[in-house]
Amino acid sequence: MPQDVCPVRAEPTFSFTQGLIFGQLSVILLLAVFIKFFIFGDPPSPEVTASLRATERRSRTLAHKKSLLSLRTASVRQPHQQPTLNKKKSSILRSGPPTLTIGSILSKTYYKVDSHQPESLDWFNVLVAQAIAQLRSDAQHDDAILTSLTKALNGTSRPDFIDEIRVTELSLGEDFPIFSNCRIIPVDEDGLDLGPGKTLDSDMARRDGARLQARMDVDLSDMITLALETKLLLNFPKRLSAVLPVALAVSVVRFSGTLSMSFIPSNSSENTPTKMVFTFLDDYRLDFSIRSLLGSRSRLQDVPKIAQLVESRLHQWFDDRCVEPRFQEIALPSMWPRKKNTRGGDDAIHDVERSMSKAKGVDIAKDLREEARKEVEADARADRAHDSLRYRRRPRAEDVFPMSGSMPGSLPGMNGPP
């Protein structure tokens, strides 16, 4: 009967200690590779980053235009008419010529879209520079901007793992934006170009809702800085398990792009006011300078990955608000002149006189109150002096002896012996 033989157990190649050491070295190697290539890796050049972002924005704009054209094609195939309400026209206003169209406005202002030279906008640059200079002066005079920024940064949207945010530096720059190369182009109701070879006429303007759009180049080279300090809080496994101080400074060093502005007329049937619409074309460039500092004792300075993340979020914030196809609308007030909005001329003199008379009236009232107070005090002193003299006056003879020939001690009506 064959004897059962137990199989020989294979001995492990590595011992427990060797496996532990090998595992620790693998983790350390992976952390080193991650820190070197993902945190401290060299960022791409600004030109490459700007080119990639411009390509992405351009593709998004083209996709939006393609979707608009497809919707227009579908609407043309299935036309529908909405009932319109005929409002009674006023019988007081004179029936003048029909409403001016885009073509008639261009002809009456002697502006030829195809051949008119772009304008330099030097006068507009001076006005904008004065407004920005006043804004900077107001910011230095009081802490309104600093208070508003601090309140906005520490609002309800601040997450729990971020401590209170403090603004450590705020600089609004020293230079001014330069607007140039302004031109007027006709666009359709969606802000798209009419395309080459299409001429603007009254029928097209009425049918497609065309309007005029002003485009101008904007260039700004400055150092607009906002520096913040906060702490990252680790609330696991218990509250405030660890704290990491963070300091971040973001500076806008250059902006160049194309600003597009147009007016949307008011609609009396929908009760909408006149609006000014502005947006930036997708060919803009926005450069930042980002400085960071992590830690309290052993500090990490200017981490490239943090700079890339912050710059990417800022570009996304700007694209989502005022880069085509998105735009900003500003409702304009009525342009009819009103008396309450009039300033200057005789009204200014009257205002100065009213303010001066008001100031003089305040001074006169103050003087009158002072004189009245002095008169009251003088009358009170005179009354007190009169009362003291009346009670302190020595008695006279006629007061003591009212009857002639009377004797001291005699009763009234009785005479002494003859």
Image (cartoon, rainbow, N blue to C red):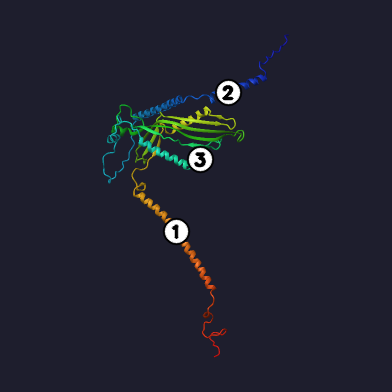
For mark 1, what is the residue?
367
Q: Is residue 37 above or below residue 126?
A: above
Looking at this view, name the residue that lies furthest to the bottom: 418
Which residue type carries mark 3?
Answer: Lys
From the top left corner, tell me how far across and down residue 38 is, in percent.
53, 25
Q: Residue at x 41, y 55 (%)?
A: 360
Q: Is label 3 or label 1 in front?
A: 1
Camera-nearest residue between 12 and 281: 281
> Badge 2, how many Cα within 10 Å: few under 14, some, many 20+?
few
**Which comes sooner in the sequence, label 3 or label 2?**
2
N-terminal of the pair, mark 3 or mark 1, is 3
**Upstream in the sequence, badge 1 or badge 2?**
2
Q: Is residue 186 left or right of residue 150?
A: left
Furthest residue to the top? 1
Query: Which residue is painted at 52% across and 35% down in the image?
Result: 228
Label annotation for residue 32: 2
Amino acid beneath label 1: Asp
Where the C terminus falls, by quadrant?
bottom right
Which quadrant would the N terminus be assigned to in this image? top right
Residue 290 coordinates in the image, percent (x, y): 50, 30
In this rendering, which labeled residue sits more in front, label 1 or label 2?
Answer: 1
- In space, the residues marked 1 and 2 are separated at their CA atoms by 83 Å
Q: Residues within 10 Å of mark 1 (few under 14, many from 20)?
A: few
Mark 3 lies on residue: 151
Check disc 2 and give the amino acid type.
Answer: Ala
Label 1 secondary element: helix
Cα distance between the residues tagged 3 and 2: 40 Å
